[in-house]
Each structure stands twice: as structure tokens, then as C-alpha cells.
Image (tube, helix red, strand yellow):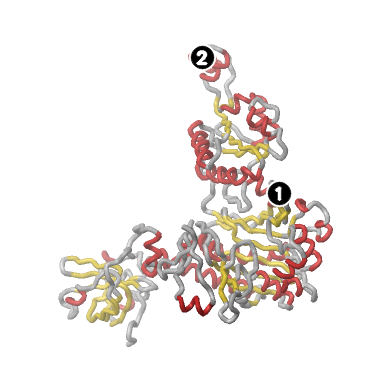
Amino acid sequence: MHAYRSNTCAELTAADTGTTVRLSGWVHRVRDHGGVLFIDLRDHYGVTQLICDPDSPVFAEVEKVRSEWCIRIDGEVKARDESLINPKLPTGEIEVFVRDIEVLGEAQELPLIVFGDQEYPEETRLRYRYLDLRREAMQDNMKLRSDVVTSIRKRMWDQDFREYQTPIITASSPEGARDFLVPSRQHPGKFYALPQAPQQFKQLIMVSGFDKYFQIAPCFRDEDPRADRSPTDFYQLDMEMSFVSQQDVFDTIQPVIAGVFEEFGGGRKVDQTWEQISYKDAALWYGTDKPDLRNPIKMQVVSDHFAGSGFAIFAKLLEQDGTEIRAIPAPTGGSRKFCDRMNAFAQKEGLPGMGYIFWREKTADSVAQELGIKVKEAQAKLKSGEVEGGMEAAGPLAKNIGPERTEAIRQQLGLGIGDAAFFLGGKPKAFEAVAGRARAAIGEELGLVDKNRFAFAWIVDFPIYEQDEETGAIDFEHNPFSMPQGGMEALNGNPLDVLGYQYDLACNGYELVSGAIRNHKPEIMLKAFELAGYGEDEVKNRFGALFNAFHYGAPPHGGCAAGIDRIVMLLADQHNIREVIMFPMNQRAEDLMMSAPSDPSSDQMMELGLRVIPQDQ
């Protein structure tokens, strides 16, 4: 018999009754039923129930074991009584009577309990991550991650892609985030960098004549953490193709992503038609370039209804250049309580509030106020039909702008009795993000979001440039390596009108994929950077390898990268990316388990020719 096991803890069935087996694993829990011990033994594959009573020659030793001890047992498989069968377990028909035991590893008092669903502070979970990972939910998340990566690889190979590895130690290359620098011992005073992404390398692979490349690539960025972003490193499906248009990239990656979500989405609906939405429209309709399309709310511009109106705040605002008023429709949100809650939400977001209108059945109170009569008299007139009932608009805005403008707004937004609308104004860039969060909160509160769906959309036509409002300087707003739509001719016009062949894939409020058709012509590359204030010498210094390579017959090429961590996070129905990373950093970019970052030794610093300058506290 094998030294540690003849079977895993998920294999034994009634067909094994009467056989002698050897199992190894962890003590999941111990139950003492009046001198008869029941132990749930757990390994990576499942759980088997052990039984031990005083007839066992090792009963005294079995009595000593505690939760999370690692043990090896020999025993006889017995069929459970029919009334004791556990249908929830693959091994629920049997139990193993223990005849021999070996303790492979004792466990001290546990800082967190593996059995059950107790909540622990993240600091505890990360410090003792090896225990946290023993929990069933975490085991499932990590197995899911492995299976997703395997599936992605297979799907890419099936489309004639080959996987190539790019360097981990390379030169610093600004790509939107801070580099992690690595000092060179052999070249004192010089530094390598960990790659933020294989961006330049994969483009060089295309110039080298390899038609289709992919890689499950580690990327390193010194970033501020968020729930959906690691502060140090992450993995992405990185891909690039030669002789392709934007649509070719979409047609290639869509079946890969959709297939993975269909395979591992637990039966949730996966959109088959992926809408293409311009960056400009996404900002207008959703307040974000990663919209959650499960929420049906679309914002609209309603400036015309407030220009010159009795609502002075909005009327005066619209006299300024570049301002507008946007409405957030709220179907079924037509109550003062709900409107007050959303107004409070806006105040928490740092705004004075949100204007609102809601529509309701005409009330006796409002009729009485309108006609200057008593409420009882108004009730009678409504009941008799002397005063027509129907719908009325309520809220401070409705009173200020009057019934005609209010009715025009209602018709534009397609709302009716029981609905509401909220309003924000100013320069769009100043309030779009808050409007997007308000849209999301309204959709959640009103139960409008379809939770059983993965909704995808391509966001396209990103502007390449933006202008600093204070200095007037032009700089890149998005990826500087993207081919401008219209090529050199577009760059000879107004830079703020230049759109790039750049695209993101949004799913349920997260950016899953980002990519572009690349700028592969050196003269266009120089012009694009010149508009953003970068001279030829700086381009050659920063991006010399790409710039030089483009002089030797570079093919048109493009690609994208899909975030593995975010994909798994969505599939696992998690809201924090650390739940699907085996050994993540905390929010301060610290590894509490390995005590990183740590102080280097003086010998290490001497060898590298470095010293640390103390920071003022």
C-alpha cells in the first residue's frame, strides 16, 4: 500500500464496503457522541467521515487529535445505515472505521477556524493565508482560477495562436502607472524595471513576423489599490495579431471570453450580442467608460428644458460655456422617501444634492392647493369627476419650472406615474463620475439590475488627447500607442477631435479587456507625440526599440489584454479581487505573511551601491 493513501477523501462509495483503505488529510472537525468519535477527514478533493470507538486499537490516540491536525489513517470501509446517509457528500454512503493512525503534523491553536463561515479581519486572513486557503470557498476560487486559465489557453490554441514568453526584467517604459525598479549589481547606479505589461515586446513580436501571439502574462504596476485592482502585480491574457482591423480583434477575442463565461458562469445568461458604444456616448448615458448594462437606466441631456426656466441655479449654470443638465430616469422611484434617500446619497458624494421630479396620481391636497379650497371639498370634486384626476409632477423642481417644461421632460424620458428623474448640472467632466455612481445606486435600490446576467459592451472611439483646463497644454488622455483614426491627416487638425482605434470591453461595471490597433508608422508616431509635447529625441529615448523597429517593414497590427483576476472575480461572484488571488498583498501593498516589503541588509545595499535616504515623518 502507498505510504500515505490508497484513495482520496472524495473517492470511496458503497462499492468499496469491506475494503481496507489508507487516507491522509486534515481533521476538519471532531464530534464525540458518547464515546464514539466521528471525524471528518478533508483533503483537496473532498471529505470522508471516520468513525472510531473503544474497539479500535488506536482509540486513545484518535482521542488526542484536534482540528487541522494532518493525519494518516488505515481503516475498513463500512456502509452507513440508510437513515444516516448524507446525500450532500460524494462519500455520504460510507464511513471508515479507524484501525491505525499516524499523526503527520500537529496544529497549534488556530488563529482562524477553517470549518464554517466565520468572518475574520482581512489582516488575519492574509497573515495566515495558508490557513485561509484551506477553507472550502477559497479552495473553490483557486480551482476556478486554474480551470479558467486552462480554458483560455485551449481556446487561444484552437484559434491558431501560439504562446510566447516575454522578459520579466526589462527597461523602464512609462505606460500609465509607476514602475517597480530593480537595481543592477553589475551596472552600479542603473536600474531594470518589472514590466507594466508586455506592450512593446508583443508589438516587436509582430514586427518579427510572428502572426499571432498570446501569453498569460504577469504584469507589475506600483499602483494605489482598489477592490478590483491589485497594488503590485496581476495576470492578463495578452494577445496581438498582424494584418488585422479593430473588428478582427473583436471577432477573435469574443468567443474566448464568452466561452469562458458560459463554461464557468454557473448557468447565468451570457450576452451573445456585444454592443459597440462610443466613449462619448458611454460617458453621457452611463457616466463611465465601463458601464453595467444589466442596469437599464440611460441618462439624457435635458438642458433645453431648464434654459431660461424658473429654476435659477440651472438657468444661470447654462449661461456658462460647456455646461449642460443631465437627467437620470428612475422607473418606479416615484416617492418622496426614495427621492430624499438619493438626495442624501448625492450629499455623501460631496454634492449639495440632486434636483428631482416624481410623478404620481393627482392628490386631493394638490387640488385643494391649486383651487384654494379645502381638502374634503377637493376629494369630493375628484370623486365626482368635476376635477379631472390623472397624473401630476411633484418635487421642488416641478414647482420652479412649471407644468409645461415638466411634462416635456417626462415625455423625453418616457416616464409615467410612479416614476422619478434626478438632475445634475455643470461641466460634464466635473459631474459625470458622480452621475454614474448615482445611476448605479438608483438601479440597485429599485431592483432594476439583472443579477443573473453577464452583459458585455465594447467601448470604442476613445479620444487620444485631452487639454489641461488651467494651462491649456495638450497631453495624451488614453493609450499613446494607438493608431489615430484618419492617420496623419487627423493629426493635422484639432488634437481634441482625434479619436483612436482603441477599445475596452466592459462587463457588469468592470473593464475586462483593453486594447488597440497600434500606430506602426514612425512618422505618425513622431507627430502623435509631438502634439503632446514630446520631441523626437524623447520619443527615441523612451521608445527607441519600437521606433527603430518600425523603420524595417512593420505590419499593421493590434491586440488586447484581458484581466484574468477580474474575469475570475466576476465568475466567482466576488467583489474583491483578493478573494481570487492565492497570495495577494493588502491595501497598503504589504505581504503580511512574508513580511514584504522588508529592509535590505547592509551587505546587500553595499553590493548594489545604494543607500536609503530617511523620509521626513
Q: Is residue 499 left or right of residue 425?
A: right
Q: Quadrant of residue 214?
A: bottom right
Which residue shows up at 64% across the image and 36% down it?
414
Q: Is residue 424 left or right of residue 208?
A: left
Which residue shows up at 59% across the image and 58% down it?
511
Q: Secondary structure at mark 1?
A: loop
Q: Quadrant of residue 251?
A: bottom right
Is any atom of residue 258 visible in this view? no
Q: Residue flagged by tag 1: what amino acid is it? A: Thr
Q: Secondary structure at mark 2?
A: helix
Q: Position of residue 517 (x, y in %)?
A: 73, 64
Q: Residue flagged by tag 2: what amino acid is it? A: Ala
369 and 39: which is toward the camera: 369
Q: Position of residue 126 (x, y in %)?
A: 41, 64
Say which of marks 2 and 1 sits in front. Answer: 1
Disc 2: CA contacts within 10 A as few (<14), some (14-19) or many (>=20): few
Determine which residue is flagged by label 2: 380
Determine which residue is flagged by label 1: 471
